[in-house]
């Protein structure tokens, strides 16, 4: 028993190191943003130094957890880097016009994205990551809201639009929304509301889209327990949504007028109020990228090809994949990605399914309208979790004691239904009702 307990402690500590590395960028970069706007260091030499130090701190967290990752998945670690380097070298050789952009992409991809993929791939106990995410969300919430208040009151200069802040504070917005749906917590509702207000006032529509998609998943998820409190909650939310939709234009105008009193000209609200569908020039980008793909449908235009043509990045995940690898290979990659996302959402293991939904909204949804998967660390965390669920057996470091705890927890949770069997290898729970004699 002592040996099992010791192994369990080591495994949890290792998972905690991995989780700290994965969440470090949220904490460090949010505090970095807070410092930059509080001391008016944006676009200054001192600000550049702060940004460099911040990246160094994030790197230290990854180095701290690296021995754990190598211990668990050394072959996977080396193989992933070998494949990634091979693909980048191929594109560097065959698409010489993209070389400058491939070099720019490579820094973020190999130092942040690939490690994020591998570290999330190595997680054994996802509950450790969930707890780390909750702690991180509080830190991000405090600094993000204070930064937002400073900007609104004119105490900090950050312009009228900050995509960075909106995607930092998206984490607490989603986690507090999740807590409200799960426990009907008014404190969580207040924190979620404040987070959304900061995003609306200063951030992008992509972050709002992520929150909306997460709310839809919460309303339709198959494992919801429909007792009377939850039914009343959903009815109240449904009535509220109807009232908001009926009075949407009036609400948006009033909110915009309120922010204008503080000198905040919200870009997102302006675009929402606009009667026409406004894609901020994306429709032109989409047409140009599709035109380039049609010229080279088999091999595409290579990594960074959308940038090389002066088009900017594609602003759509599937369009970018098609541009990078061509219609056939890009289409296959996209279909496989969609298949495993949907397969994971409907897993019998509801805890892992729900975790994937959270990261789907943090690292995938916004890539439909913004960003690039080649430099988006959160997208690669999602990919690592998907691989973790479907392709990997537990590593040697996984705790047998943790499996026993899961077995006991699920038996306790479903004691009213009779006995329950928890399969630690698949995460499946089988309930058995006692037959009446």
Image (cartoon, rainbow, N blue to C red):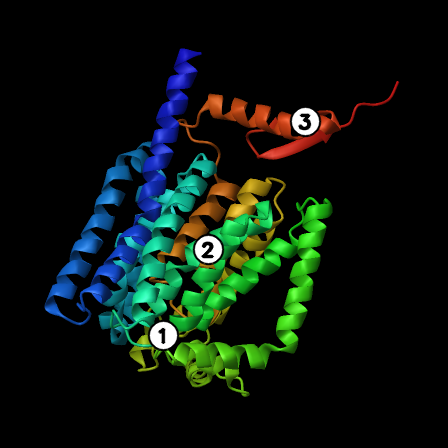
- Specify whether residue 238 is in view: yes
Residue 125 on image: x %, y %: 45, 34
Can you tell which quarter of the image residue 98 is in?
bottom left
How many other residues sit within 10 Å of disc 3, few (<14), some (14-19) or many (≥20)? many
Mark found first going from the N terminus, 3 or 1 = 1
Q: Which residue is mark 1?
A: 313
Mark found first going from the N terminus, 2 or 1 = 2
Q: Secondary structure at mark 1?
A: loop
The structure residue drawn at horizontal position 49% and vertical position 67%, both measured from the top left corner, is: 208
Specify whether 47 is left or right of 187: left
Q: Which residue is mark 2?
A: 191
Specify whether 225 is left or right of 306: right
Q: Which residue is mark 3?
A: 420
How many other residues sit within 10 Å of disc 1, few (<14), some (14-19) or many (≥20)? many
- Where 159 sits versus 359, above or below? below
Q: Secondary structure at mark 2?
A: helix
């Amino acid at each position: 028993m002592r040996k099992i307990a010791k192994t369990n402690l080591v495994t949890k500590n290792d998972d905690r190191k991995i989780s700290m590395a994965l969440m470090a960028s949220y904490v460090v970069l949010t505090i970095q943003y807070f410092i930059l706007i509080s001391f008016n260091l944006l676009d200054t030499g001192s600000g550049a130094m702060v940004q460099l130090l911040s990246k160094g701190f994030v790197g230290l967290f990854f180095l701290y957890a690296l021995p754990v990752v190598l211990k668990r998945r050394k072959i996977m670690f080396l193989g992933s880097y070998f494949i990634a380097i091979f693909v980048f070298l191929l594109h560097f050789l065959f698409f010489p016009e993209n070389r400058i952009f491939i070099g720019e992409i490579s820094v973020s991809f190999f130092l942040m994205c690939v490690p994020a993929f591998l570290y999330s791939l190595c997680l054994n106990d996802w509950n450790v990551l969930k707890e780390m995410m909750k702690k991180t969300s509080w830190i991000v919430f405090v600094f993000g809201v204070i930064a937002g208040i400073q900007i609104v009151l004119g105490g900090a200069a950050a312009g009228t639009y900050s995509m960075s802040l909106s995607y930092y504070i998206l984490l607490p917005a989603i986690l507090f929304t999740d807590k409200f749906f799960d426990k009907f917590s008014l404190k969580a509702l207040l924190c979620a509301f404040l987070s959304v207000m900061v995003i609306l006032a200063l951030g992008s529509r992509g972050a709002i889209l992520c929150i909306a998609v997460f709310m839809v998943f919460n309303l339709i998820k198959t494992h919801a327990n429909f007792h009377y409190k939850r039914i009343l909650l959903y009815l109240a939310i449904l009535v509220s949504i109807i009232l908001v939709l009926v009075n949407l234009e009036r609400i948006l105008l009033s909110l915009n007028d309120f922010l204008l009193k503080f000198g905040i000209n919200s870009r997102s609200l302006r675009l929402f109020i606009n009667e026409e569908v406004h894609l901020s020039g994306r429709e032109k980008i989409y047409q140009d990228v599709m035109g380039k793909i049609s010229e080279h449908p088999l091999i595409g235009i290579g990594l960074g090809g959308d940038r090389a043509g002066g088009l900017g990045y594609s602003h759509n995940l599937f369009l970018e994949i098609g541009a990078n690898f061509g219609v056939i290979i890009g289409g296959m990659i996209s279909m496989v990605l969609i298949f495993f996302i949907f397969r994971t959402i409907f897993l019998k293991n509801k805890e892992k399914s729900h975790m994937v939904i959270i990261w789907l909204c943090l690292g995938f949804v916004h890539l439909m309208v913004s960003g690039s998967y080649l430099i988006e660390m959160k997208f690669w965390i999602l990919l690592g979790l998907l691989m973790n669920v479907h392709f990997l057996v537990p590593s040697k470091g996984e705790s047998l004691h943790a499996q026993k705890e899961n077995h006991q927890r699920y038996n306790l949770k479903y004691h009213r239904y009779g006995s329950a069997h928890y399969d630690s290898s698949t995460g499946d729970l089988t309930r058995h009702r006692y037959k009446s004699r």
